[in-house]
Image (cartoon, rainbow, N blue to C red):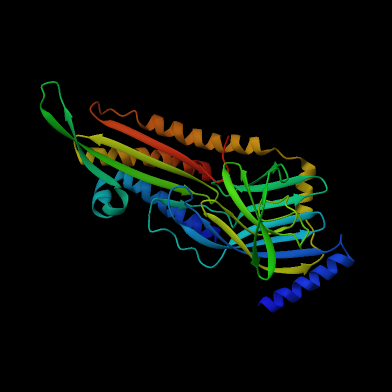
Amino acid sequence: MKKVILLVSFAFAAFMSHAADNETSLKNDNKDQQVKSVKMLESKTDDQQISRLCSVTLKGVVNAGVFSVEISCTNSAESCEQATKLSASCLTAALKTVKDIIY
Amino acid sequence: MKKIFTTLFIFISTLSISQPNTDGFLVFYNAKFNNQFGRGNDFREYQGKLIIQGNQSLFTMKEKGNIIPLDDKFNIDVSPDSLFTVYKDAESSSLIFDFSDINQQILYFADTLHPMQWILTQEKKMIDQITCLKAHTQFKGRDYIAWYAPSIPIDNGPWKLGGLPGLILEAYDAEDDWHLVCTSLKPTSNNTFLFYEKIILKGLEGYEAYTDYMQKIFRRIKSTLATSQTGDCLTCENKSVIKLHTWEKIY
């Protein structure tokens, strides 16, 4: 049982590391599951021209039965690619900490 | 099933009259627990087992069947084999609970034995032909309801619950995220709890140490998130949220 859980954890951690390094993988392979929400935000600049920001939220949960840690990373950038990259980087860092605690 | 249960109960009652201090009891509960308590639904089925031997008891709650993970690749499940594990020793007023942290290392902490203030009611119901009375309490941030059997004069129950004038045969929290119902009660004997007795002799830290430990993990992840936000993108906006969900309230 523990082996199965650890195996899943390993696979997930490896996947997250890969996701951080490879944007193509994030976009094409697991778009629906990984990118929790993407929305365009409007923001006004000094010269009143409207620029649009893309906001991406990634969420991860470590469940240990009677307690769980929920991590959510939201990033907004001019391009969705950049926002995704930032959110993936944020979540990877957080989960790396969890991984460091585990191993 | 009911006939067997009644026969067993009569047998146990007879034994308890003739040998009040040496009997052991094995109480099984059907249990369900929402692994996403407070934020969603992920109900799983467990078997609760309460072994009572003299003044000592051990409660465990193990998952039944195969685990069906959520269809979400962002979930890491490091749940231990048994949840809500609690050892009690009424003679020394000791209670030990175990805690499996995220590296699946089991840590043991002490807590107060049956500190909850129960409000007793006269509401009755039958659980497997045994008359039970309703009681409720608030304990570590949650409201609990218990149905206890005055005809079984054992002030014990699942997990940390107890201190009622009868064995708890059903218990649940007000949100119904955790629910146990007794399915059988059997006589047992020769149970020893040497492992826990040794732990007590070594000395244990209390509930405060447990909450400190939880907060330490929480702060560590939180600080990692804070440092990861210092990027070189001046126009980017970022917001990270970290939430710690614990069954017992962390003070």
Report the front residue among B79 and B13: B13
Q: Is residue B241 left or right of residue B19?
A: left
Identity of the residue drawn at 78% across and 67% down: B188
* Image location (x, y in percent) of residue A9: 46, 53
* Image location (x, y in percent) of residue B106: 63, 48
- Direction front: furthest residue: B122
- Direction right: furthest residue: B18
Identity of the residue drawn at 55% across and 49% down: A66
Q: Is residue A103 visible?
A: no
Q: From what the image shows, is residue A86 above or below residue B70?
A: above
Report the front residue among A14 and B88: B88
Quadrant location, the N terminus of chain B: bottom right
Q: From what the image shows, is residue A79 above or below residue B149?
A: above
Q: Is residue B196 left or right of residue A70?
A: right
* Image location (x, y in percent) of residue A10: 45, 52
* Image location (x, y in percent) of residue B202: 77, 42
Give the total of numbered labels: 0
Quadrant of residue B152 in the image?
A: bottom right
Q: From what the image shows, is residue B171 above or below residue B38?
A: below
Quadrant location, the C terminus of chain B: top right
Q: Is residue A45 left or right of residue B118?
A: left
Report the front residue among A18 and A90: A90
Q: From what the image shows, is residue A86 above or below residue B152?
A: above
Q: Is residue B125 visible?
A: yes
Identity of the residue drawn at 23% across and 34% down: A77
Report the front residue among A94 and B178: B178
- Direction top: furthest residue: A46
